[in-house]
Amino acid sequence: MGSLYITNELSELLQPKDTQALEQSILKPTFLQKDDAGLDLVQLLKTSSFLLGCGFTLTFHCPLGIPSDELLTLFFHTLQDAIAFIKNHPTAHEEIPQTIQNYGKLLAEGKLVAFPTETVYGLGADATNEHAVARIFEAKQRPFFDPLIVHIASLDQLDGLVSEAPQSAYRLMETFWPGPLTLVMKKHPSVADIVTAKSATVAVRMPSNPLALALIKASGRPIAAPSANRFGYTSPTTAEHVHQQLSGRIDAVLDGGACTVGIESTVLSLYTDVPTILRPGKIGVEELKPILGDVKVAQTTGPTDTHLESPGLLENHYAPKTPLYLVEDVAEYKDRSDVGVLLFEQTDLEYKGPTQIISEHKNAEQAASRLYWAIRRLEEMHLSFMVSTLLPHQGIGVAINNRLKKAAIKHGQPSSL
Ligand code: TXA
Ligand code: MG
């Protein structure tokens, strides 16, 4: 992964001239190193593939008033995105803490604020304000039977949300929070029905993205937040994705670059007899078993059933506009200029249509971070359809396969090759 390490006012460091030099140096690739100015691309040369542009991070001093160190690291899929961020936020180190305070106030006033988490962007509202929560459903056009995850920044916020948690819950929190694990537990009577879709349980998670944590803290509230997309569409992993679907329907979007995990959190129910994964995510059975012993995995890609334990886990939940087909061998489509191809590793084959290489060597974590982003890029090209294979069924590959199946399932097989 590339790294732009910046310690001062961002715009002063990156004049238009530098931007060009930087872009050219990346493409060649020779590299530019400007220690004095705090710009350091050494990491980028060591670990990233320039042809793929696997991702860039931007690190700068930004005290957020939360217990993490004072360096904030933002992730971007392309150098252009990183540079655009610098141009749009030339004094990010001052602007971001101020914006977080302002947006925290908006949330406390019952407004809707979209914000980055490590998984996907969430659309936040004060979970204790029913009117604010109702606006989430309105903005997303989401049915009321689909309950929301409540996001917290500290464990004391569990009071008033959860009425009973098994011992294992605390061990899970200690191990995986803050992080991409959502726990479903018995709800506190004060949690409004609109948050939980009248269920006896509430889903809670503490995200690890420092901007998310700082925003929740600034609001002083538990924050109900589904993914910040219109209902039924792919989850957003950049602020731009949020604007595309929700612009004009919500009050603010906090731009924090691209989400690093890239797919939604693992949803684990501790309310069932045996703890049950309702939605697979980065944290899988292998990591949960040592703590829980037995873990079940709910069947979530069978026939559509509104009585699923997690009602949002419906078949077409992640549907892209361009049909996606899961195939055995994507190479069979290499002569189709109207077909987009998702690739999990580099290839020497020439494809006539557009390809998105989402990981270099079947690296599932990398693929997850780029999956939705790549699908959106292919969607913008107005292709006949897209094709992908599945990944080996292990680790985060399980969650990727789950999302790919959901995105593909309603389209069946391509009628002609
Ligand atoms: O990574 C994530 O979890 C992201 C970020 C923003 O935190 N959020 C997210 O929220 O994906 P959403 O609303 O798009 O998906 C939440 C899932 C839904 O499938 C919902 O049905 C399930 O969690 N869920 C929420 N509350 C539940 C409950 N009480 N019992 C069972 N499932 C629940
Ligand atoms: Mg969602």
Image: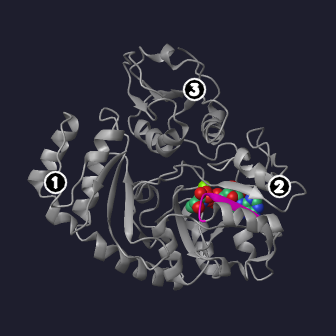
Name the image quarter holding residue 297. top right
Q: Tell me which image quadrant ligand 2 sits in.
A: bottom right
Labels 2 and 1: the sequence-earlier one: 1
Select label 2 or label 1 by which is in front.
1
Name the image quarter holding residue 302. top right
Q: Residue at position x 38%, y 76% from top?
A: 63
Labels 3 and 2: the sequence-earlier one: 2
Write the start and end of the magenta stretch as one range: 178-184
Q: In the rendered view of the protein, which quadrant contains the N terminus?
A: top left
Relative to residue 304, is residue 355 drawn left or right? left
282 inside magenta stretch: no
Query: Is residue 143 in view?
Result: no
Out of 337 and 366, give the one closest to the viewer.
366
Q: Residue at position x 38%, y 18% from top?
A: 351
* Label 2 – label 1 distance at C-alpha: 52 Å
Q: Residue under circle 1?
A: 34
Q: Residue under circle 2?
A: 275
* Label 3 – label 1 distance at C-alpha: 42 Å
Q: Residues within 10 Å of mark 2 (few under 14, many from 20)?
A: many
